[in-house]
């Protein structure tokens, strides 16, 4: 029988746990995005002025951490964020925050999949008070610095208090991500984006605590990356001389991302989506230059969209070229993942190639041809100490696929994009790790119609009625749609462990620099929070309603940081909490 003292201790422990869970679910006068796993802010809520001599003290052994410290110190002094709704806090008089101290236990931990990103942030209220970020790695410390920056704001008003820099005080944050892989897939094969656009996107990702920039570099439309061993691919495959990424560009992008705790995972999609290779090597590309949709019949298509061309796995030269490509890519990009593509192999393209058709006439199959290619490329990727990532099609496509022997689960990750949670389940049931990019939830290009010309469907006055509006994956994916998706839906506990995270996908057939930010942000912020701390409160309820005001504020801060994120509500809604809800 429990003693009275033991019962009291149990009661205190339970009460503390309940308070911590309640605190994690609370909205505060100033909030952090993504919402931390646990944030405690003593009541009454207080804030302390930041001293003009404020500085950050951190270890100097890790150059990426040093860069981050310099960047956040500068951000804190220059940012002029003023919340739309004035935070109801007590400002501590006679005390200023003098410094933030960063402590890291393992400065040498490399930025790789699964690295510890946890941190603890404490901001005290004592006179001459200090703030501390404690983390296991430099990458976790960067997440803590971002949280600290979002707990600071400028006052309005007049006189001596105008433009006063405040930071929340009496705060403790204990935080770590739920999923280790939180990414954005970015397509530069359809549209070339200047390096500045890529850097701005990566910077915004880091602010949202996203950690994987999946760079879909090439596609059938263009080959914009210069490779030392295969210079003609870019010379004859890019849109123009000024639309290529040089070796120096790539190095700068990778270093920029590293200094923000963001991994750059390269993708050179093959053997499909390779029409742009034909300028340099016409002999290795089947059906290149042919109209993609003969007779306007989808069943006779040569490609999934305009730009027909697939590498020919029966041509020996193909393997010489792809070997050089893989060697160069793995030299330029240090990450442990290499995305090899292998999606949307279109039977009609290979069947239109005489050498492949002759093989089929001898009893061969398209799946055998694909497996020949993958069985050669996969060991090459693995020999570079890389894990190979493929789109789900390589296993799940009904017409052309490979056996598990060609893509062993130990060295393979599959990225799902079709059929929602059903395909995720098929992947993990087969023993593969999964990255979730379900088009029904995470494709940011959807809902803007299609880009093919002379399409007579729009001549029908009812063509858009109760439909996808001409977009194959419509309708538009709102931030709520992104936020509410549970990537482990329908999985057992064991199956869910194989889901390493997710990525929103920005395909760019109808996107360029003029609209990029608004297409990505703040919808990508929605997946950032869902994969960092979840989309449910402690009681298991979806918290999209509570997230709305916080996302409004975060979008406002992002705009102030130079990201042209689109609005999610009129300003009227944020200034009248609850009045724009569907249900009172």
Image (cartoon, rainbow, N blue to C red):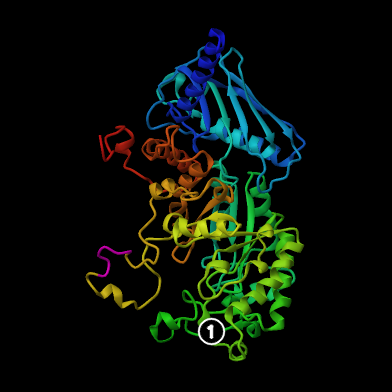
Find residue 538 and report its image quarter: top left
Please state, as top left, top right, bottom left or bottom right, where the C terminus lies in the image. Answer: top left
Q: Residue furthest left?
A: 461
Q: Is residue 356 above or below residue 401?
A: below
- Residue 507 percent coordinates (x, y): 49, 62
SS at mark 1 in the image: loop
Find residue 572 and report its image quarter: top left
Q: Please state the total of marks drawn on the protein image.
A: 1
Q: Is residue 35 above or below residue 8?
A: below
- Residue 156 percent coordinates (x, y): 42, 26
- Residue 215 percent coordinates (x, y): 59, 59
**Front-lying residue, 530 or 149:** 530
Q: Residue furthest front?
A: 1
Q: Is residue 94 visible?
A: no
| Residue 550 within the magenta-colored segment of the rendering | no
- Left or right? Give the position of 398 relative to 575: right
- Left or right? Give the position of 81 relative to 194: left
Q: Is residue 317 above or below residue 323?
A: below
Residue located 38% across and 51% down the image: 478
Residue located 65% across and 85% down the image: 283
Please state, as top left, top right, bottom left or bottom right, where the N terminus lies in the image. Answer: top right
Which residue matches tag 1? 289
- Left or right? Give the position of 63 relative to 421: right
Q: Is residue 125 visible?
A: yes
- Residue 361 percent coordinates (x, y): 59, 91
**Front-lying residue, 203 or 334:** 334
- Mark 1 crowdedness (10 Å alpha carbons): few <14, some 14-19, many ≥20: some
Q: Which residues are magenta?
A: 463-468
**Front-lying residue, 342 or 83:** 342
Q: Main secondary structure of the magenta part?
A: loop
């Amino acid at each position: 029988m429990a003693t009275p003292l033991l019962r009291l201790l149990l009661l205190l422990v339970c009460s503390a746990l309940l308070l911590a869970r309640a605190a994690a679910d609370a909205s505060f006068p100033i909030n952090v995005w993504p919402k931390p796993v646990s944030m405690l802010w003593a009541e009454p809520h207080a804030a302390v002025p930041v001293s003009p001599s404020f500085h950050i003290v951190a270890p100097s052994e890790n150059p990426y951490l040093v860069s981050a410290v310099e960047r956040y110190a500068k951000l804190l002094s220059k940012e002029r964020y003023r919340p739309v709704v004035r935070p109801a806090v007590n400002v501590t008089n006679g005390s200023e925050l003098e410094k933030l101290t960063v402590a890291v236990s393992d400065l040498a931990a490399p930025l790789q999949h699964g690295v510890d990103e946890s941190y603890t942030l404490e901001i005290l209220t004592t006179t001459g008070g200090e703030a501390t970020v404690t983390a296991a790695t430099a990458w976790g410390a960067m997440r803590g610095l971002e949280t600290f920056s979002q707990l600071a704001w400028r006052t309005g008003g007049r006189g001596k208090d105008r433009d006063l820099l405040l930071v929340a005080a009496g705060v403790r944050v204990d935080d770590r991500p739920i999923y280790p892989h939180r990414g954005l897939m970015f397509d530069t094969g359809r549209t070339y984006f200047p390096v500045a656009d890529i850097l701005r996107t990566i910077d915004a990702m880091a602010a949202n605590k996203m950690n994987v920039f999946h760079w879909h570099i090439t596609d059938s439309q263009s080959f914009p990356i210069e490779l030392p061993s295969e210079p003609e691919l870019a010379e004859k495959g890019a849109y123009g001389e000024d639309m290529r990424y040089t070796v120096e560009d790539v190095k700068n992008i990778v270093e920029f991302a590293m200094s923000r705790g963001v991994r750059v995972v390269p993708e050179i999609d093959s053997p499909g989506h390779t029409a742009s290779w034909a300028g340099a090597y016409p002999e290795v590309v089947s059906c290149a230059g042919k109209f993609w949709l003969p007779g306007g019949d989808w069943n006779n298509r040569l490609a999934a969209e305009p730009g027909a061309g697939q590498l020919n796995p029966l041509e020996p030269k193909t393997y010489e070229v792809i070997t050089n490509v893989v060697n160069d890519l793995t030299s330029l990009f240090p990450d442990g993942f290499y995305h090899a593509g292998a999606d949307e192999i279109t039977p009609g393209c290979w069947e239109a190639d005489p050498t492949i058709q002759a093989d089929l006439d001898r009893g061969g199959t398209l799946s055998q041809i694909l497996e020949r290619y993958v069985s050669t490329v996969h060991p090459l990727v693995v020999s570079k100490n890389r894990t190979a990532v493929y789109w789900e099609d390589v296993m799940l496509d009904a017409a052309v696929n490979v056996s598990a022997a060609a893509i062993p689960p130990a060295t393979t990750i599959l990225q799902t994009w079709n059929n929602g949670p059903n395909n995720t389940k098929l992947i993990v049931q087969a023993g593969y790790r999964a990255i979730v990019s379900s088009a029904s939830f995470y494709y940011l290009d959807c809902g803007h119609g299609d880009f093919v010309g002379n399409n007579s469907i729009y001549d029908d006055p009812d063509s858009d009625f109760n439909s996808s509006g001409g977009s194959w994956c419509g309708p538009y994916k709102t931030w709520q749609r992104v936020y509410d998706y549970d990537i482990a839906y329908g999985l057992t506990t064991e199956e869910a462990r194989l889901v390493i995270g997710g990525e929103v996908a920005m395909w760019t057939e109808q996107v360029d620099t003029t609209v990029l930010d608004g297409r990505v942000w703040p919808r990508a912020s929605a997946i950032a929070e869902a994969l960092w701390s979840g989309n449910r409160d402690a009681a298991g309820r979806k918290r999209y309603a509570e997230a709305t005001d916080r996302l409004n504020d975060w979008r406002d801060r992002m705009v102030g940081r130079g990201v042209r994120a689109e609005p999610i509500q009129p300003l009227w809604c944020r200034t009248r909490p609850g009045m724009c809800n569907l249900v009172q």
